[in-house]
């Protein structure tokens, strides 16, 4: 199963399954290296399970609770010109409406006042802040509200020193938390002033920004910024926040970096999409430069993929969801994405259109995290059947919830 943990770049996909809960239907793709014709593929299923049998291999897959394959519903369907090495099938599923959805992994939605939390470094699992209890947990204005203030005010930002947390406050941004510093921070956190970028220092319209970066003393990972002498800004992609329960380690910090980032961003996109009724997101660096454009297509997908290299002969395969070692299909978000550095003409036109028309709710993340997120998306894209990797000028990826 080790080969299932790395992206598929040089080989095709043996089995790919995407189920849509709202549509109660699904798409199954079988590579022709596994089956030469639709007649060689037999699909059966039971309660919360799916089984695909073909001459080149078998797929046994656990589905989420309450999701079942409708027997006899699998039928071949045309896949288009890009499907020369693939067989496409449509199938029906049934959904038990009483089945509970999994709890959200969105830390910003889980935080509550008057409860005790511990903050861990996601990189090295070090406890950064112990037993923090907040009297108030309050949301900040959404998006780049501070940039809008700069554009509309002809005098210094009147909110600069007013939207900061008090001693027992936690203020929630779209991708970060604002906390007051206390004595315990000196033992676990380091602050280093980063010089302003060359472009900012040459632009008279921009204030000279010198970021005070906050990092973990144990592993030196950058966690956020010191936006004021007594205020910490910690990005949700860099820390794990969990209720205080004895001396146990944070469960989320046991995930590998790629999986943690994937699930954290997916949960945040889903929550913002639901609350703001938006499907377009512009991932930006702290200097407000767009790095990635994301278009959320589906939030009800259940996906699993198995590469050809993991299927052989009579061997039964229990595949993971994308990038996982779990034998269970995963709830995912289906995204279209474009890297703003892409040099393609069509991609540049899309990026320009988003910028001119102010499309995309801004999500600010450190540059290194933006690069990591792009790698996660590219790994997902490379593991898809060739016919599904592109949609017009965009590339396709799935992020697990």
Image: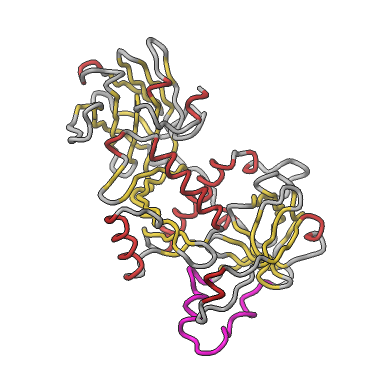
In terms of image quadrants, where is residue 246?
top right
* Tally of numbered tags: 0
Q: Nearer the viewer, residue 1 or 192?
A: 192
In terms of image quadrants, where is residue 15?
top left
Placement of 327 over or under 250, stated as above or below: above
Left or right of 77 on screen, residue 165: right
Q: Residue at x 38, y 37 (%)?
A: 96
Name the spot of residue 13 as percent of width and height, x first: 35, 27
Does 156 lie within the magenta span?
A: yes
Q: Residue at x 53, y 67 (%)?
A: 287
Name the spot of residue 33 as percent of width and height, x first: 30, 19
Q: Residue at x 70, y 54 (%)?
A: 117
In terms of image quadrants, where is residue 31?
top left
Name the spot of residue 378 as percent of width and height, x first: 42, 43
- Going by the picture, which residue comes out furthest to the bottom? 154
Q: Which residues are magenta?
A: 141-165
User: Which secondary structure dominates the residues rendered in magenta?
Assistant: loop
Left or right of 193 on screen, residue 207: left
Q: Nearer the viewer, residue 132 or 322?
A: 322
Placement of 329 over or under 266, stated as above or below: above
Name the spot of residue 333 as percent of width and height, x first: 40, 46
Placement of 24 over or under 317, stated as above or below: below
Does 382 lie within the magenta span?
A: no
Left or right of 99 on screen, residue 350: left
């Amino acid at each position: 199963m080790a080969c299932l943990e790395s992206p598929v770049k040089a080989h095709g996909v043996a089995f790919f399954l995407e189920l849509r809960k709202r549509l109660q239907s699904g798409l199954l793709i079988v590579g022709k290296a596994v089956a030469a014709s639709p007649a060689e593929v037999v699909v059966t299923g039971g309660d919360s399970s799916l089984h695909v049998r073909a001459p080149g291999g078998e797929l046994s897959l656990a589905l989420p609770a309450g999701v079942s394959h409708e027997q006899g519903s699998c039928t071949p369907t045309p896949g288009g010109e890009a499907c020369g090495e693939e067989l496409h099938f449509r199938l029906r599923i049934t959904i038990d409406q009483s089945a509970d959805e999994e709890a959200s992994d969105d830390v910003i939605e889980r935080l509550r006042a008057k409860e005790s939390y511990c903050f861990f470094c996601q990189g090295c699992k070090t406890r950064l802040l112990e037993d923090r209890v907040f009297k108030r947990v309050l949301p900040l204005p959404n998006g780049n509200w501070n940039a809008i203030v700069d554009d509309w005010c002809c005098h210094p930002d009147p909110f600069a020193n007013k939207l900061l947390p008090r001693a027992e406050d936690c203020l929630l941004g779209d991708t970060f938390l604002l906390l007051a510093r206390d004595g315990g921070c000196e033992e676990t956190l380091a602050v280093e002033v980063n010089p302003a970028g060359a472009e900012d220092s040459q632009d008279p319209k921009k204030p000279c920004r010198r970021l005070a970066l906050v990092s973990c003393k144990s592993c030196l990972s950058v966690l956020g910024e010191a936006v004021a002498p007594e205020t910490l800004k910690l990005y949700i992609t860099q820390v794990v926040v969990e209720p205080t329960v004895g001396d146990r380690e944070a469960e989320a910090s046991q995930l590998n970096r790629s999986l943690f980032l994937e699930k954290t961003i997916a949960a945040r996109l889903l929550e913002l999409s639901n609350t703001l009724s938006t499907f377009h997101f512009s991932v930006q660096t702290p200097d407000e430069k767009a790095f990635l454009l994301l278009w959320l297509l589906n939030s009800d997908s259940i996906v699993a993929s198995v590469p050809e290299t993991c299927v052989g002969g009579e061997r039964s395969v229990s595949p993971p969801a994308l990038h996982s070692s779990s034998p269970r299909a995963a709830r995912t978000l289906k995204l279209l994405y474009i890297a703003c550095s892409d040099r393609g003409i069509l991609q540049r036109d899309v990026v320009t259109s988003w910028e001119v028309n102010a499309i995309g709710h801004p999500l600010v993340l450190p540059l290194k995290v933006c690069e990591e997120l792009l790698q996660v998306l590219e790994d997902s894209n490379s593991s898809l059947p060739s016919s599904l990797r592109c949609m017009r000028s965009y590339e396709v990826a799935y992020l697990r919830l």
